[in-house]
Amino acid sequence: MTTSFMAVLRRDLLLAMRRKNEVLTALFFFVIVASLFPLAIGPEPRLLRKIGPGVLWVAALLSTLLGLHRLFADDYADGTLEQMALSPAGFAGIVTAKMLGHWLLAGLPLVLLAPLLGVQYDLDGGALLLLTLTLLLGTPLLSMIGAIGAALTLGLRGGGALLALLVLPLYIPALVFGAGAVEAHVAGLTYSGHMALLGAMLVVAAFFTPLAVTAAIRIALE
Amino acid sequence: MARARSHLRGEQLACIRGDRSLFSGLGFELHGGEWLHVRGANGAGKTSLLRQLAGLSRPASGRIFWNDSDIARDGDGYRSALLYLGHPSGVKDDLSVIENLRIAAAIDGAPLGETAALSALARIGLNGRADLPVRVLSQGQRRRALLARLIVRPADVWILDEPFNALDTRAVALVCELVAEHLARGGMAVLTSHQSIPLHGALELELA
């Protein structure tokens, strides 16, 4: 089980290294979207401080969506996904490795970039730290929910647009509590409730998504 | 020997695509050392049957037993005894030939050393091409890159969908040789092919 988990993880990272542009596109998209707002709105520190956390979170959602449809679609098209589904080592572990790979490539870089981009919104040190923390809890959640959507739309024509329609509404709770925590901090309120809910959602998702994704892919393979 | 007793049995298998019934009431029993040649015209349901036998899709009716346990219920034991190589290429274009082989083995939970991988590739006729990305290979070579798994992955049941597609005559002979060795070890195989296969001990299954 651990052998196949590590093999799939290493494989997905290796494939991403061979096609760097796909990972970099999503990252630059995040950077650019997050930088457009301060330019459009102008230097108004109070307004920027207010919208900053929300804008960064929305940019993170959209950036996560960019490469999401390819999470399983490539492997589905070339038949390696059905080989994985038949692996004696268990499919749920393989699926979890793929989700972890997606997070390492599409989620973790956003977490690391967010404090830099947050400076444009005149957020102070505490708010930047909290923003990073909410994204650290939130981006794995985005990868997991996204994986469910990617598995459900596997093999559909025009699945990319459908995937966005399917997944974005499901991202709302993460968005509300993630951005809400930072906004609460900026407004001088307590934010521990937001963080606790975000953490709880992460734990529930970590438990259920491998089951849901496995089932959805098996249906798609039939 | 436990292996000689193992068997694969299908009972009353049926497949329905849309509102068309491809086949129904299909049954067979396969023991170690035997192989099943699935024949039929294009669209007769050969690939559908093979996917059912691999456990990738569920039969519309009927059941499949591996050593008397239903594979729909107890799939884990069956999957470790099964090697299914299907229609799609099954290899990653961006990875090299040897990476494909070693990663596939590791995903199956049985890591493969570099020497073993290289000797398998030499046997399948990809000598000196191990480090090329699969993208630059010809169709036949890609097929060989996939079929190299026959050499390295121990399995009791081989299910091969059109294994001779795109292969030249030497490669066809080589695959036949591999299947023959596998049968001699007490394994069993299910093949589809439009060509006649020069192997003994065949059970025939004709899909109308």
Image: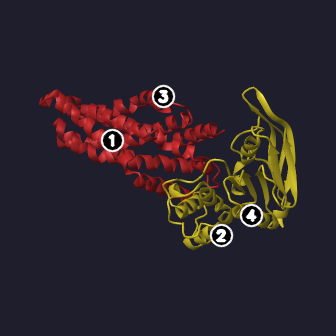
Chain colours: A red, B yellow
Residue B56 visible, this orientation: yes
| Residue B5 in the image, given as x and y percentages of width and height | 85, 60
Marks 2, 3: nearer the viewer: 2
The chain identifier of the residue carrying mark 1 reads A
Is residue A101 found left or right of A60 in the rendered image?
Answer: right
The chain identifier of the residue carrying mark 4 reads B
Checking the image for residue B173, the label placed there is 4
Depicted B191 relative to depicted A35: above or below = below
Q: Residues within 10 Å of mark 4 (few under 14, many from 20)?
A: some
Residue named by callout 2:
B123
Image quarter of residue B10: top right
Residue named by callout 1:
A135
Give the Cα separation between the discs numbered 4 and 2: 12 Å
Check if mark 3 and mark 4 are on a common chain.
Answer: no
Mark 4 and mark 3 in contact (Cβ < 8 Å)?
Answer: no
| Residue B87 in the image, given as x and y percentages of width and height | 66, 47
Is residue B191 found left or right of B88 in the rendered image?
Answer: right
